[in-house]
Amino acid sequence: MNLEEYKGVFVFAQQVDNELSGIALELVGKGKDLAKDLGTEVTAVLVGSGVKALADELAAYGADKVIVVDDPELKEYRTEPYAHAISSVINKYKPEIFLVGATAIGRDLGPRVSARIHTGLTADCTQLEIGDFPINPIPGKEQKHNQLLMTRPAFGGNTIATIACPDFRPQMATVRPGVMQKAPKVEGAKAVVEEFNPGFTPDSKYVEILEVVKSVVETVDIMDAKILVSGGRGVGSAENFKMLEDLADALNATVSCSRAVVDAGWQVTDLQVGQTGKTVRPNVYFAIGISGAIQHVAGMEESDIIIAINKDETAPIFDVADYGIVGDLNKIVPMLTEQLKAATK
């Protein structure tokens, strides 16, 4: 493999029902930063049917170029045609870096593509940067420069691993939604659009979609919330979450929770914050009855202000909190709610 042939930062611009997913714009923003460090451009790869109109939105968030793969076979996500589309783009354009969102679609698509083009894939990354590898020079071993350093939690979140792919291209990673930030939107921006279609011939590997049934979700997406009132095992029961809901109502906030709460059946998975849940970065995050295990902290440590309420003064959550209250949440939360309601009358 001639590594010099591979240039540019490419991102998979995931869309569903001809609407760009938030992760697509987050990856364009991060891709722009990486491309700047490498002195190159960021290219978004837009795959679907009738999706060309989305190119300008990608340009508004920083894409220099958009490659559009448009075909009726790509209307809904199916593994085989999408994997064929992306691997064909990589084989033709030879990007140095290719990023995919760690969504349900991305986690299915990324490994399939990396296997086809014979390169590595680092999954569920929380940080990406350009640097030297090995990070610390090793006597007798060449240190390669301008490598993509991909950081992700490992061993159940108990340690953080930084991984590189120095000998194969592209360097591929799936990235957790909500971790990277979108670039500021530039109204009226235009990208260079190039259409590419490798051809699609359905075969025995193509599944047939008989019906698409959309679930009706009544809960607010916690990744979009400005204020989160999050409860952990210390809340005690599903019934006690009524206290948190009252506090959230007083703040015009959204309730979320830790994994222990979901495992106990007190709340639904859509509300889970953490390594195995969602990554959030609200303006204010209340951690109530949450001990602060590293798996949970990984999903909320980028919040602007963190307020912790816990009866255990040694709880790890106080290490990341901006404000901490040591005491019985059953007394503190209702008092806080009462004061907030009084202040808004």
Image: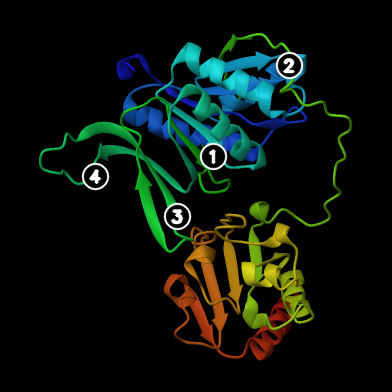
Residue tagged 4: 135
Residue tagged 3: 153
Q: Is residue 217 above or below residue 267?
A: above
Residue 135, by quadrant, is top left
Q: Quadrant of the C terminus?
A: bottom right
Residue tagged 2: 203
In the displayed structure image, the side of residue 294 where residue 105 appears, left or right: right
Is there a contact, CB below 8 Å, between mark 4 and mark 2?
no
Measured as percent of width and height from the top left, residue 181 is found at: 52, 43
Measured as percent of width and height from the top left, residue 265 is found at: 75, 71
In the displayed structure image, the side of residue 206 where residue 172 appears, left or right: left
Q: Residue at x 86, y 35 (%)?
A: 212
- The amino acid on which the numbered mark 3 sits, given as a three-letter code, is Pro
Point out the frontmost of discs 1 and 3. Answer: 3
- Tell me the element at label 4: loop
| Earlier-in-chain disc, 1 versus 3 | 3
Is there a contact, CB below 8 Å, between mark 1 and mark 3?
no
For the residue pair 248 and 167, the one nearer the viewer reads as 167
Q: CA distance from mark 1 to mark 4?
A: 28 Å
- Tell me the element at label 2: loop
- Tell me the element at label 3: strand
Q: Residue at x 72, y 70 (%)?
A: 248
Is there a contact, CB below 8 Å, between mark 1 and mark 2?
no
| Earlier-in-chain disc, 1 versus 2 | 1
| Earlier-in-chain disc, 3 versus 4 | 4
- The amino acid on which the numbered mark 2 sits, given as a three-letter code, is Asp
